[in-house]
Amino acid sequence: MRSLLMTAALVNAALLAPPVLAQDAATLVEGVLAQHVLPGFQTFATRTEALTAAAQSDCQPQSAELRAAFHEGFDAWMAVSHLRFGPSEVDERAFALAFWPDTKGFTPKSLTKFITTEDPVIAEPEAFGEVSIAARGFFAMEYLLYDDTIATLGDAQYHCALVQAVAADIDRQAQAILADWQGGYATSMQTPSDAAEYATDLAAVAQLFKALDTGLQFNEEARLGRPLGSFEKPRPRRAEARRSGRSLRNITVSLTALEELSQALAAQTPGVAERLEAAFAVAFEQAEVLAEDPVFAGVAEMQGRFKVEILQQYIGNIRDIVTQELGPALDVTAGFNALDGD
């Protein structure tokens, strides 16, 4: 359990932290967009373009170049995956890029059907963009490259074409999201009005704050909570991206991006920024402790489970500072999100 003394201290600090002046909210939004959002999606689009090129050059599952491009693209998605609003929501782009958790195993089932029937839809980019999101995105690519069954299933030539289709589809989603941000959505966040999506600058700040809080919550409750399961029944095979060995990596990349966002939002409250920096540093130190268990297989044993639980607690502590100090300082709350009540 988190320390009651720590919680009380956070509450007291929140009460003492002055809210950001209304006229400064616009500056905060501008800073977050310029320092975090737009560069993040630009990098993502650049990396997915490279992934498509790598798949065209060598589509074999064991290709070192293809796997490296996959990891770089996945890293870039982790760095923006918490920004699940606006352009990422259009046409379910975020889900098409990362369909996880897949509690029913739809991704391997969908890919198996594609491969065994040699569905010709993969040759038509627009049509492939309409197929089940379970057969698309980074988790579909992970199965195609790293799953012992899917990676060797069916005709090699068709498998190759499917890898290329999935890579190209990932890139189309990334380019579309970037185009929407650059083509007007960023401007809409900086020019609020009663007729626009954001009526005030503070409403835009609230959206960015919610992305920060929800990103932390997803790391705490899904990326760590799912493999932890319960003490009586740990679930290591539920770890995100375990086939490609990315479970811990996804969290550290995500936390790095979330720290960047938190610092941008805390730019006008240096005391809160310092406490967030210290809390993130503790979490990163614990992540290093887990470096030898990158897929959380150790949750099945007492000592390994304890290490993962500590990281989970440290991320929870970061979230406490965000909700109890940063939120009041900004005069915003995270509100309800899709993770609440799951």
Image (spheres, rainbow, N blue to C red):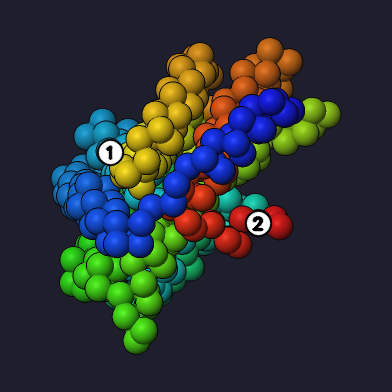
Asked whether, in this view, residue 182 is left or right of residue 124, the answer is left
> Residue 113's spot in the image, x, y percent?
52, 61
Residue 327 visible in the picture: yes
* Quadrant occupied by the C terminus: bottom right
Asked whether, in this view, residue 313 is left or right of residue 64, the answer is right
Residue 141, above or below 66: below
Q: Say which residue label 1 marks.
A: 72
Asked whether, in this view, residue 21 is left or right of residue 309, the answer is left
- Whether residues under marks 1 and 2 lie with C-beta atoms below 8 angstroms apart, the answer is no
* Quadrant occupied by the N terminus: top right
> Camera-side residue: 313 or 62?
313
Residue occupying the point 62% across, 22% down: 310
Say what amino acid the circle numbered 2 marks: Asp
Say what amino acid the circle numbered 1 marks: Glu
Residue 285, above or below 66: above
Residue 254 location, quadrant: top left
> Camera-side residue: 271 or 181?
271
Element under disc 1: helix
Task: Indicate which disc, 1 or 2, sits on the residue closer to the N terminus.
Answer: 1
Distance from the alpha carbon under mark 1 to that under mark 2: 31 Å
Mark in front: 1 vs 2: 2
Q: Say which residue label 2 marks.
A: 340
> Residue 38's spot in the image, x, y percent?
22, 55
> Camera-side residue: 224 or 33?
33
